[in-house]
Amino acid sequence: MAGDAIVAEELTYRYDELVAVDHISFKVAEGEILGFLGPNGAGKSTTVKVLTGQLQPREGKVTVLGIDITRDPEKVQAQIGVCFEITNLYEKMSAEENLKLFARLFGVSDFDAGALLERVGLAGRERDRVEEYSKGMKQRLMVARALVNRPSILFLDEPTDGLDPASAENIRKVILEERERGATVFLTTHDMMEADKLSDRVGFINQGKIVALDTPHNLKQQYGKRALRAQIAGPDGGLESREIIMDQPETVEAVQELFGQEQVVTIHSEEASLEDIFIDITGRGLTE
Ligand code: ADP
Ligand code: MG
């Protein structure tokens, strides 16, 4: 059985009086993708900064790859890759030079910048200066840079936020390839589709607290309502919509009534989205 790559116990971080991360506890198994889903200001970036040793926890404990992050941050940092929200690349240098510099810093000897740039869709542009890159290209280069040391854990803070669809899709592909390689991924996002698609488990974070953490499937089973949505012919020739909640004592009768008494034009089943469930639990949406 795989061990735990990350263990957070009662982790708390405050900016002066403001509690940004409030006694959160969770584990991420080796080889797992954990999606950390929450709206702006929920505490996602602060959590990533504490997990990666950029900020010191005010309370609680973080163990990454078996090492207490406050005891030996350098040892942890050598084995992880991080991609923060704000791009901090050398703009006057090319993509290739940025990566080679990082490889030297990490002491990676057999480094193939071309192969890595190919993976993030930057082949052909590797010698152009980063200042000439679009936002999506810079972000893909940030992801490539996080992979230079072949990290055991990849921390990605909203890596696809505000990107063009092709860049976002490229980054999602690379995330899945990394898990294939055996890496653990800690991914923050406020995109529920992304969290649903990529994550083995999803943690919902709201106001610094984890309010749910499970597989997307289990979250939907536990909190979501499945429904049948039908369109029926209305009296004046228009269409009317009907919804029947599934798995209820009255479901069968409602379906029989629908087909017996109405002219059903279309019918399909619907599953609650992670956003619906997030709203159910927290009373707020992911993008407000
Ligand atoms: P998220 O990444 O989910 O948007 P953050 O971790 O950035 O959330 O922020 C959590 C809370 O901490 C927010 O209320 C935010 O305003 C506050 N915060 C973040 N960074 C700082 C900072 N450097 N100084 C003071 N407050 C901060
Ligand atoms: Mg953030």
Image (tube, helix red, strand yellow):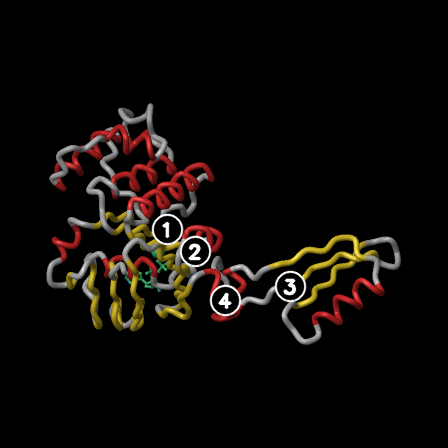
Mark 1 touches mark 3? (CB < 8 Å):
no
Mark 3 lies on residue: 227
Residue 193 placement (x, y as % from top left): 49, 52
Q: Does 53 sit left or right of 129 as displayed?
A: left
Task: Note whether ligand 2 is within 8 Å of mark 1.
Answer: yes
Mark 4 lies on residue: 284
- Callout 1 amino acid: Glu
Q: Closer to the camera, 94 or 188?
A: 188
Label 3 or label 4, whichever comes before in sequence order: 3
Label 1 or label 4, whichever comes before in sequence order: 1
Mark 3 touches mark 2? (CB < 8 Å):
no
Label 1 or label 3, whichever comes before in sequence order: 1
Spatial CA distance of label 3 from label 4 is 22 Å
Q: Kindly indicate the quadrant of the structure image that contains residue 58.
A: bottom left
Is 241 located above or below residue 109 in the figure? Answer: below
Report the disc number at residue 190.
2
Q: Kindly indicate the quadrant of the structure image that contains residue 121.
A: top left
The residue sitting at 49% across, 71% down in the picture is 281
Task: Note whether ligand 1 is within 8 Å of mark 2.
Answer: yes
Residue 215 placement (x, y as % from top left): 43, 62
Nearer the observer: mark 1 or 3; the answer is 3
Residue 191 placement (x, y as % from top left): 46, 53
Spatial CA distance of label 3 from label 2 is 25 Å
Mark 2 touches mark 4? (CB < 8 Å):
no
Label 2 or label 4, whichever comes before in sequence order: 2
Spatial CA distance of label 1 from label 3 is 31 Å
Mark 4, Cα crowd under 10 Å, few <14 / some 14-19 / many 20+, is some
Report the disc number at residue 158.
1
- Callout 3 amino acid: Ala
The residue sitting at 34% across, 40% down in the picture is 139
